Amino acid sequence: MKSFHLINYIRNKSLRWRIMVCIGIAILMLTASLLTTMRLSYYSMQNLGDSYKSNTELTHFSTAVSATEKAMENYVNYRSFESIDAYYNSKTKVEDFFKQFQEFPSKNEVAHKEYIVHQLTEAFLYYSNLAISARRANNEQEILLNYNYAMNSYNYLTSQILELNNLRLQQNAERYDENQSRIVISNTLSILFFLVFSVIIFFVLYLTITSIMEPLADISEVAHKVARRNFDVPLFNRTTNDEIGTICNAFDRMIISIREYIDTIWEKARTEAELKEKEIEMQALYTDAQLRALQNQVNPHFLFNTLNTGAQLAMMENADKTCYFIEQVADFFRYNIQQQSRVVSIDEELALVDNFVYIMKVRFGNRLEFTKKIPDGSFPQKIPSMTLQPLVENCIKHGLKNTKGKVCLEVSREEKHIVISISDNGEGMPDKTREAVFKAVAAETTRLPEDVLDDKSSHNGTGLISVFLRLQLQFHRYDLFDISSGDNKEGTKFIIRIPDHV
């Protein structure tokens, strides 16, 4: 699947890009072949150079041991500062060298010889230190004894170093032969790598050139057929975005245009007939829409006329309360329909709330207690219509779940806002529902999630969210509304802040 996408990706590139990539791949492969060959040669020469490195190190070690012995002898005989300084310098070099030797016996001949050299070196350094210390204390007996031990160790050590050197020469000669074989293998591998990379480069160039030339041959054949007025040729339907794809698409469009031009003459009459039928159908739809619009205008007037007729009948029958109730219902519906998609003053909204609360009190009687706390003066500030009534309706709905529903509407003035609060004594809004309402307002949707709708609180939130959204759209602010617990931590309280300057 990945190779298929890669092939499509390459085909969509321009010819220049594909040629340059092909050249770049060839250069990279040649470079990789050269680097591989150089790397193999480097390792072969490095191994060849390391063959006798151990003998060189052993020679340096032997030189350091001889210098230590000579410095010890000079200090024992002449007790000079230069000799003691030379002793300690040479001794440090010897200690650095002999730590590299085998510390334990081994079945390997070279390793075991290194172990013997390691032990003799320790003995030589030990007795030479004792001889130096005895010379400092002028203890002639100890000087002679330790000096003889040191010289015996030194003589035996030099002979063992010579034997070890011979063993390493033998070992390094064998390694030299092995490295020579490796050099031959490395050269063979280098030739193989070069041949493999050359074959790969050839196939890459072949595939690239073939992918470019084959479509050109097809285009040339189609061009000859079209020149002979043979338009019954298959379309290329090439989906690539390179230059060849552009040419193929141009050929396809040209052939299609010629065919369409020929077919247009025969299809013209039928097309005109179809357009005439569509025109008649559109005219019928337009007429039907006009009729529906007129019908929608008649229905509200029919409702208002019916309610007014009922009010007149109640008045004729001296049913004053019924007459007033019907008039209030008619005014409520008239406001609801006429003020849609408009802004009204707070005073108009408060008057609608009075109208609505009167209707609700007639319905629920003493079960509903509604109180208002409104300061003197007018409130001409503009708000979206039907803003307060849905909130009052919500409070009445949830407040009446108790024995007696209490709803309070309060208006107050702050520094730059008119604050309107509407509260009830119902069960209260769960925090989960409250958060869901604000999230829905932020997302500009009027539907709450299913898990909130399943809540026992029965809040569907549609009307409430609609009010908050319309306030948000009207004032372009998100801090004009809030929901909290009512007084004494019971029920729900809706708070709206209207800017005083609107």
Image (cartoon, helix red, strand yellow):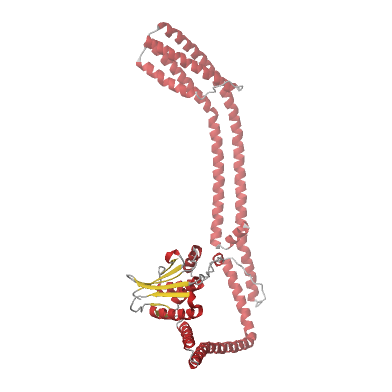
Residue at image location 48% in from the left, 20% down from the top:
62
Q: Position of residue 376 (x, y in %)?
A: 33, 77
Outermost residue, bottom side: 316
Q: Is residue 211 visible?
A: yes
Residue 17, by quadrant, is: bottom right
218 lies left or right of 493: right
Q: Is residue 145 left or right of residue 449?
A: left
**Relative to the observer, which residue lies in front, 19 or 408?**
408
Q: Is residue 193 above or below residue 90?
A: below
Q: Is residue 315 above or below residue 183?
A: below
Q: Residue furthest top?
A: 141
Q: Residue at x 66, y 72 (%)?
A: 234
Quarter of the image containing the C terminus? bottom left
Decide if residue 293 is on the left or right side of residue 236.
left
Determine the residue positioned at 61% across, 61% down. 211
Identify whether 354 is placed above or below 204.
below
Q: Is residue 416 left or right of residue 162?
A: left
Q: Residue furthest left?
A: 415
Q: Which is more toward the observer, 157 or 436?
A: 436
Q: Viewer-proximal residue, 408 or 458?
A: 408
Q: Disc count in the image?
A: 0
Location of the N terminus by quadrant is bottom right
In this view, the residue in front, 227 or 376, is 376
User: Residue 116, image x and y in percent?
Assistant: 55, 18
Q: Is residue 161 visible?
A: no
* Residue 138 % position (x, y): 38, 8
Residue 467 horizontal/vertical position (percent): 46, 73
